[in-house]
Amino acid sequence: MHQLGILYADKGEVEEAIALYNQSLEITERIGYVKGKAMTLWSLAHLAEQQGEYTKAISYLQLALEILQRLKSPDAESVNASLDRIMLNS
């Protein structure tokens, strides 16, 4: 679902991408794929930022960052940079 969300987002079909990302969140939570959940939250944050929904983007990024830091994932640095950028520009 996450990959399909990316395809729809790239085509500019934001509502469909969001729906697919939300399905991805449900699946990753159900199967316990924590990193997948974080990556989907990051993607949702990107779409929210593009739509000017900065509060929503920050919320998604904070959740993703918390997960990635707990996992000690190197992706945490990139999410943190995105979070800092949005917080400075919003």
Image (spheres, rainbow, N blue to C red):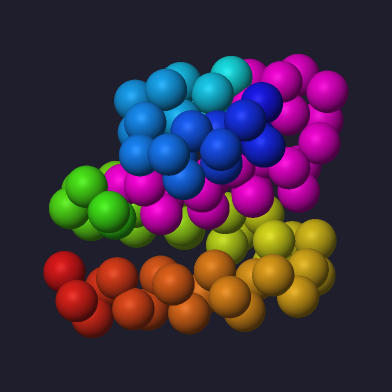
Direction front: furthest residue: 11
Residue pictured at 54% horizontal, 69% vertical: 79
Closer to us: 58 or 78: 78
Residue 30: x and y, percent? 76, 19
Closer to us: 4 or 18: 4
- Note whether 37 is above or below 59 in the view shown: above
Quarter placement of the N terminus: top right
- Note whether 79 is above or below 1 in the view shown: below
**Relative horizontal placement of residue 55, taking residue 70 as reference (left or right):** left
Residue 15: x and y, percent? 34, 25
Closer to us: 22 or 64: 22
- Note whether 20 is above or below 70 in the view shown: above
Asked if residue 34 lies in the magenta stretch, the reply is yes
Residue pictured at 56% horizontal, 38% vertical: 7
Residue span colored magenta: 24-48
Q: Main secondary structure of the magenta part?
A: helix
Residue 13: x and y, percent? 37, 31
